[in-house]
Image (tube, rainbow, N blue to C red):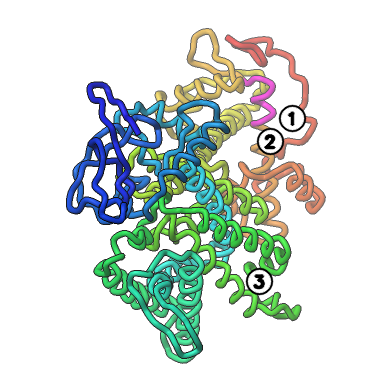
Amino acid sequence: MKLETENLKLTAHPHPACGHLLPGEGIKRDALGQAEAPEGRHEIVRGVNPGWEARKTNKPCKGGTQKKSQFGSEVELAPPRVSAALGWLAVVALLALVPESAWAAKIGDVAEETSLGQQAARFFSFRDPSVRYAVFGSVLLGISCGLLGCFIVVRKMALVGDTLSHAVLPGVALGFLFSGVSVSGLFDWSFDVDNITKNPALIFAGAVIAGVAGTFLVTTLKQTTKIKEDSALGLTLASFFAVGICLLTMIQDLPTGNKSGIDKFMFGQAAAIGEDDIQLMLGVTVLIVAVVFLFYKELLVTSFDAGFARSIALPSEWIHHGLMLLVAFAVVIALQAVGVVLVSAMLITPAAAAYLLTDRMHRMLFLAVGFGVASGVIGAFISFLKPNIPTGPCMVLGASAVFAVAFFGGPRHGVLTRWWRHVSRSKRVQRENTLKAVYQVLENRSAQPEDSVSLKELAERRRETLDEVSGQTRALKQHGLVTLHEEGNKILFTPSGWQLACTIVRNHRLWELYLTNAANIAADHVHDDAEEIEHVLGDDVVRELERMLDDTTRDPHGRAIPGFADIHKPFAPAATGPSGYGRSS
């Protein structure tokens, strides 16, 4: 096999033990004709094709292929066969029909000098199997965690998800160790360290068992002792996680520990997701979707009203334990991508963001799934661009960014949205109070609505300065509620301003009348309450008050209550004095 670089031509031969390409004209063979594997360090030459890196590295040969992991770490793989690799390259080339489509075993195989745009294009082309596995796994993770996270959030059990995610770590370690056990008979078991491999099925089984054991421990502590649920959850989380850390440390000391990839379960590494992992994740995700679809009503009623569920003979406890089992499943399949430490964030954060955006459970489920999928893909993409960053933190940061947008910009519960509504409501109330003051000035003078009111009179009525009143009148003019006299020191109602002022005064005085007649409150104690309620009374409530009250012409203080005829009465301009009713200055 001949490889060329810019300034180097060489003939390379595959290392018989590890598959690395060795420079030179040939390799030694023993008396039987078998190739001898050079020991110690040797140069590794990778070609310029997309599946290789055009560089030389000097590293010890351990009889296995060392390839750079998806995000920068070294992972030991089984010795490849050159013929199989060439066959795979040929298949991919035939499928893609372009040289750049040759496979890259790991996302990190993209050369470091590749531009950001080229890296993004390569990621979203999905031509690398490792990228497809990472993205597909992230999508499945978002679906499963998004669905179950909604029920965890509405049940106020966020700490339960965190506890489960940490409690499964001992099961992950034990499942990994159990792969080295050979069973020849019922009592003939043997353990070989060299046979230890990352078996997804064994790891899944061990993690589920550990999660169920953690849940059982929490329930037992809560039912048999005085310990509250939060204390039991914290105790279980800490104890199980400590055992898991000890087991992982022991595994790292084993001869095969460093090349197992088991350390990726701490913070997640999408690069470590393989075909077996995808099949397991797909099966669990299909199971979760099917259960949620078939038992949606039962999950809904037990989540919002467990007492009612028990009253209609629903097995609430069994439904709860079934949900916890599904959560354990989701946690286990998420460990590979997100890691033990942060998997609870993928359960809670997308669901919490969706909770801020809707009040309907079915909408919350769809939003949480969308947010979870988006967070997973964003995390995988960022880790692809920055190989040294683990996948899990990037996914959690993506989910946190989504939550931040919902928290600050949500249409109903967003902080900025609520602040803007408060500011708008305050300005509206101030405008309505100013209009009411203008109405009262005209009422005290027995003037017509087309007559003007000076800013000095308005300031005395409002008990404010002229500058403050001037600013309020400018706001009224901007909204088309008043016009300014030519001299600039007097204001006049527009038709819409007059109608709004009459409506506010009517609401105020009707409410005072209602409190004195229906609630028997003294007339001198109803003003402050009417000041607040006048701005929120709707037309339906006003009509109901009119039906309940016998006489709605006068308020408890003897002042006239504007009626429909007064509000819509056509007025002619006054014969004397400045006028401008309905006209702009």
Is residue 59 visible in the rendered image? The answer is yes
Which residue is at the front of the view, 341 or 481? 341
- Crowding around mark 3 (Cα neighbors within 10 Å: few <14, some 14 to 19, many 20+) is many
Three-letter residue code for mark 2: Thr
Q: Residue at (41%, 80%) from the top-left corner?
A: 232
Three-letter residue code for mark 1: Ile
Task: Inspect the magenta stretch and tell me whether residue 195 lies in it.
Answer: no
- Crowding around mark 2 (Cα neighbors within 10 Å: few <14, some 14 to 19, many 20+) is many
Residue 238 sits in quarter:
bottom left
Circle 2 sits on which residue?
503
Disc 1 to disc 2, C-alpha distance: 7 Å
Regarding mark 2 in the picture, which secondary structure is present there?
helix
Disc 3 to disc 1, C-alpha distance: 53 Å
Q: Residue at (38%, 55%) from the top-left corner?
A: 78
Disc 3 to disc 2, C-alpha distance: 47 Å
Q: Are marks 1 and 2 in contact (CB under 8 Å)?
A: yes
Q: Residue at (35%, 75%) from the top-left corner?
A: 192
Q: Residue 370: x percent and y percent?
A: 58, 46
Q: Residue 359: x percent and y percent?
A: 63, 53
Is residue 372 visible in the rendered image? The answer is no
Which residue is at the front of the view, 241 or 250? 250
Residue 51 sits in quarter:
top left
Quarter the C terminus occupies: top right
Q: Which of the numbered marks, if any, corresponds to residue 567? A: 1
Circle 3 sits on which residue?
302
- Crowding around mark 1 (Cα neighbors within 10 Å: few <14, some 14 to 19, many 20+) is some
Q: How many marks?
A: 3
Quarter the N terminus occupies: top left
Extent of the magenta region? 493-500
